[in-house]
Amino acid sequence: MLFLQVALLIVFIPGGDSDDDFQEPISFRTILTTSFYNHSWTQNQGSAWLDELQTHGWNSKTGVFFYLQPWSRGNFSKKELMKQERDFQTFSITFPLIFQDHVSQWQLEYPFLVQVVKGCVLHVGEASKGFLRIAYQGSDLVSFQNTSWWPSPKGGNRAQEVCKLLNQYYVVNVRIEAHVNEVCPRFLLGLLDAGKADLQRQVRPEAWLSGGPSPGPGHLLLVCHVSGFYPKPVWVMWMRGEQEQPDSQRGDVLPHADGTWYLQTSLDVEAREAAGLSCRVRHSSLGGQDMVLYWGEEGLVPGWERVVLQHSKRAR
Ligand SMILES: *[C@@H]1O[C@H](CO)[C@@H](O)[C@H](O)[C@H]1NC(C)=O
Ligand SMILES: *[C@@H]1O[C@H](CO)[C@@H](O)[C@H](O)[C@H]1NC(C)=O
Ligand SMILES: *[C@@H]1O[C@H](CO)[C@@H](O)[C@H](O)[C@H]1NC(C)=O
């Protein structure tokens, strides 16, 4: 798409928020996805994630973990990591068998997909919380809490049946409880510490404006692009002076391959009202100074401390 050629002006003005706004709970989770094709054929995929950052891959044939970040081993010893690897491998073999053995009883229909997500979440200043959930065909089926399995409200009869079965494995459930509430938070803390330099880095966004596809006669779609920032929390708003424009449409925050993020926020306005609008960006990397990009004709307002960027085409 060929965007409009827009001259823009970026100024930095003091932002309103403190760093506290960017503190969020953080989770570590492993995911096993099993595809069931027929009674004798299943396929596993495994991975592990620190929030949205993948830390581990997994070879389903050899059962070996891939450490995707230099700090993916956290502070665990080789021996402890090998035990985790063995346990995951054993689980990936035995768990699908439970489903294979209950295909008719639980009214499962080939081909189907079962996802198991297991992990723990840390809230700042609170005890960690372990979790384990199973989904069938992309919908929550059952979840684990306090050494027991509980059906999801929408899981229906099938969820009740699955719980009834899984709750019979008391010894396994005690072991799960220990894993999600002891091993997982210990690993997560070690991971956060080992990856500190990477995880606490601050990368400033690049921002630019463009015109989007016309929303209608006499209207303009103003698009504010904010790209390459880290960490993820960001605030982007179309403004007229100090007035936030409530019709600003915030898109999803999308990942770049290098772990930084991209966001676009657009505003549908009458063409004659576009002048004087600005896009304001607030991010922890900006040191309390908001980035402000003015929509306007060429030349723009003289006399400000400013950076003028010229962007022509952006492929996205
Ligand atoms: C099971 O599915 C696999 C993969 O689609 C296929 O190769 C195999 O022949 C099927 N087996 C049976 C018993 O249907
Ligand atoms: C967990 O279960 C135990 C024993 O059944 C009970 O005493 C405890 O209150 C439960 N805790 C929570 C958080 O539900
Ligand atoms: C790793 O770090 C965590 C958190 O600092 C700590 O509790 C744990 O004892 C350390 N070592 C191992 C092997 O988990």
Image: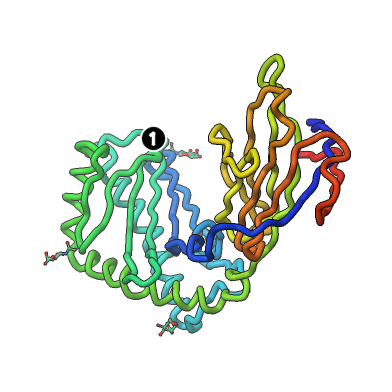
Residue 48 visible? no
Report x, y in % for residue 145. Answer: 24, 59
| Residue marked by disc 1 | 110
Q: Looking at mark 1, is its residue's CB closer than 8 Å to ligand 1?
A: no
The quarter holding residue 277 reads: top right
The quadrant of the picture showing ligand 2 is bottom left
Picture layout, residue 194 above or below residue 252? below
Picture layout, residue 250 above or below residue 50? above
Identify the image quadrant of the C terminus: top right
Foreground pick, 204 / 270:
270
Kindly state the secondary structure of the residue where label 1 is placed: loop
Residue 93 horizontal side relative to residue 14, left or right: left
Residue 302 horizontal side relative to residue 289, left or right: right
Query: Residue placed farthest to the front in the image?
Result: 303
Report the coloring of the rendering: rainbow
The quarter holding residue 146 reads: bottom left
Q: Residue at x 78, y 31 (%)?
A: 1
Residue 30 horizontal side relative to residue 285, left or right: left
Report x, y in % for residue 20. Answer: 48, 65
Foreground pick, 306 / 108:
306
Picture layout, residue 243 above or below residue 274? below
Residue 4 visible? yes
Foreground pick, 68 / 310:
310
Report x, y in % for residue 12. Answer: 71, 56
Amino acid type shown at disc 1: Tyr
Q: Residue at x 44, y 80 (%)?
A: 80
Picture layout, residue 81 above or below residue 114? below
Q: Residue at x 50, y 53 (%)?
A: 45
Report x, y in % for residue 315. Answer: 79, 39
Residue 224 horizontal side relative to residue 27, left or right: right
Q: Residue at x 57, y 56 (%)?
A: 232
